[in-house]
Amino acid sequence: MSENNVSLPDLTGRTAVVTGANSGLGLETAKVLAGRGARVVLAVRDTGKGEEAARQIRGETEVRRLDLADLASVREFADGWKGDLHLLINNAGLMAIPESRTRDGFETQFGVNHLGHFALTNLLLEHVTGRVVTLSSGLHRTVRGIHFADVNLEGRYTPHRAYGQSKLANLLFTLELQRRLDEVGSQVLATAAHPGYAATNLQSRSGKPFLDRLMRISNRVLAQSAAAGALPTVYAATQDVPGAAFAGPTGLFVNGAPGPSSRSAAAQDPAAARRLWDLSEEMTGTSFPL
C-alpha cells in the first residue's frame, strides 16, 4: 500500500499515540496508522470529540484524555500508560491565538506546542520502542531564536511571534532528544515534520473575526487537504530516515509528496537546543529518563 508515493509498512501489533487526534492533521494521521494495522490511542482534551473522531477511523482505536495545557493531566496520562509504545506522535498544537496562559502559568502556545509535549515525551520515553515524531512548521523561520530571557514574551507578545517560537522549539527539542538518545545507545529515533499549508481549524482561532474569515477563504482556495498535510508526519514516522530528520511537502507551493525538508540555521543550533532542554526541564519538572 502507498499514500502519495509513501510506501507504508504493516503496523500490525504496534501501538501509536497521536495527540490532538480528534480533528485535522491528527485525525488524518490516526486514520493512516490504524489503516495499516496499528492500535491508535487518540490523546485528546475533549474525549467526547475524541470518541466522535474514533468512529471515523477504520481499525483499532482508544480514546484517552490529555490536556497539554495542564502538566497534571500530562502526568496522569503517562502514569496510566502500560506496555510498549511504538510511535509517539506529538501532533496537537495551537496557532496564532490571543495571548493567554496555561494552567501552570506558561504562555499558551509555548506551553501546549512545546512544553506539554516535552513533558509527555520524557514521561513516556521508557515505553517507546520506535519513534517520537514532533510537528513543527515552516513558520519556525519567522523568529531568529528562542527568547530565553522570557519565553512567555511578557510585554512583547504577538500571536505569530509566539507561534514561531513554539515551532522553533519543536525542532530544537527534536535535535537535542536525538542527541541524548544517541548518547545512551538507544535505537529510538526522534524526527520532526511540518504539513506545509494544509487546511485545518488551526487557522481560524485568532480571535479576530475578519482575519478568521479571510483564513477560511484562503484554506478553501490555496491550501492542500488535511489528509495531504498529514503525510509528512506519516513519512517521518515510517520511512527510512536518520535521527532528527525533518519531513515536509516537496512541492513548489508548500504542498505535494512528502520528503526531506530544510530548516533554519536557528533550528540547527546544538547549544540553543541544550539550553532549551535545560530550561524545559526546569519549567516542567521532567527530565530525560534513559
Image (tube, rainbow, N blue to C red):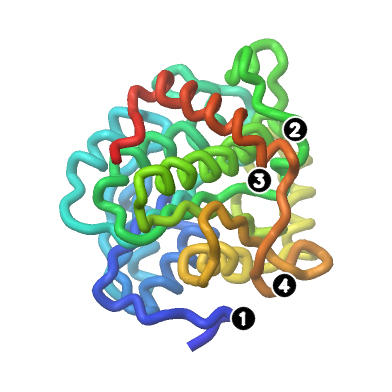
Residue 46 x %, y %: 36, 46
Marks 1 and 3 sit apart, C-alpha to C-alpha, by 27 Å
Marks 1 and 2 sit apart, C-alpha to C-alpha, by 31 Å
The residue beneath circle 1 is: 4
Looking at the rendered structure, the secondary structure element under dot 1 is loop
Q: Amino acid at mark 4?
A: Gly
Residue 16 x %, y %: 34, 61
Residue 52 x %, y %: 36, 61
Location of the C terminus by quadrant is top left
- Decide: is 109 above or below 106: below
Looking at the rendered structure, the secondary structure element under dot 4 is loop
Marks 4 and 1 sit apart, C-alpha to C-alpha, by 8 Å
Name the mark nearer the viewer: 1 or 3: 1
The residue beneath circle 2 is: 143
- Tell me the quarter of the picture where residue 34 sits: bottom left
Tell which circle, 3 or 4, labels the residue nearer the N-terminal end: 3
Q: Amino acid at mark 2?
A: Val
Tell which circle, 4 or 2, labels the residue nearer the N-terminal end: 2
Marks 4 and 2 sit apart, C-alpha to C-alpha, by 25 Å
The residue beneath circle 3 is: 204
The residue beneath circle 4 is: 256
User: Which is nearer the eye, 27 or 167?
Assistant: 167
Q: Amino acid at mark 1?
A: Asn
